[in-house]
Image (cartoon, rainbow, N blue to C red):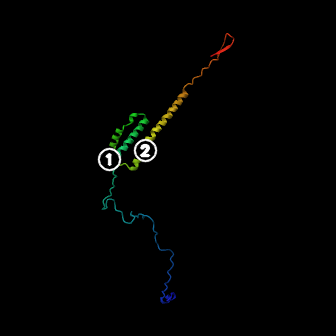
Amino acid sequence: MTIFDVDKEMPAKPVEAASPVVDSPPEVSPKRRGRPPKSANGSADGLPETPIGTTDSPPKVKRKRKAKPIDAGLLAKQIVGLHKVAATMTGLRELEVSEFEAVMLAESLAAVSREYDVAIDGKLAATLQLAASLGVIYVPRIVMIKKRAIQAKESQAASESAPTPTPTPTPPPIVVPSESGNVAASH
């Protein structure tokens, strides 16, 4: 049997009448990406929303962050540095604190933060550390530069306002005739 013989053995299908021409395709909404929009009753799936407090599930409880312990040694160094900066800026040496005082203050602050569950975010702590370091390093330098500029201005103003001494004229040499008849100049 050949390919041409297959057509002879198969009965011919009746030809169906042509369907009428349709002007518009059937209504098919295209698929949209993303979350479906809310319907008129408020939910995306068409079901009415349940009012708050009427669900059978327990309410969600937000977990509090556990406060990270504050490093008292690092805080003590910051306290010493900040007090030195304050003493330098104000000129009051009494504002400086000793290492012992700074450690005592830092440990007290750490204990209070633990008891009151004060959590310092890692980013905030790093930012505060950077600000304190910049203050300890650059504020004394800025204060010294400003003091030096003020002193230079004052010394320049003092030198300009001081009267300049007028030079005393030197008298001309006195000519005394000598006995031999030569003229000798004396000063």
Q: Amino acid at mark 1?
A: Arg
- In the rendering, at what x and y percent does residue 146 appear? 49, 36
- In the rendering, at what x and y percent does residue 93 appear? 40, 34
Seen in the picture, residue 48 relative to 93 is either above or below; the reply is below
Q: Residues within 10 Å of mark 1 (few under 14, many from 20)?
A: some
Outermost residue on the front side: it is 180
Q: Nearer the viewer, residue 103 or 109?
A: 103
- In the rendering, at what x and y percent does residue 125 appear? 39, 47
Q: Residues within 10 Å of mark 2 (few under 14, many from 20)?
A: few
Disc assigned to residue 131: 2
**What residue is shown at x 66% (from left), y 14% (from top)?**
184
Seen in the picture, residue 66 relative to 167 is either above or below; the reply is below
Q: Within the image, what quadrant is residue 182 found in?
A: top right
The quarter in which the C terminus is drawn is top right
Q: Amino acid at mark 2?
A: Ala
**What residue is shown at x 45% (from left), y 39% (from top)?**
139
CB contact under 8 Å: marks 1 and 2: no
Dot 1 lies on which element?
helix
Q: Within the image, what quadrant is residue 86 found in?
A: top left
Q: Nearer the viewer, residue 54 or 166?
A: 166
- In the rendering, at what x and y percent does residue 26 appear? 47, 74
Dot 2 lies on which element?
helix
**What residue is shown at x 47% (from left), y 38% (from top)?**
141
Q: Which residue is mark 1?
A: 114
Nearer-N-terminus badge (1/2): 1
**What residue is shown at x 50% (from left), y 33% (from top)?**
150
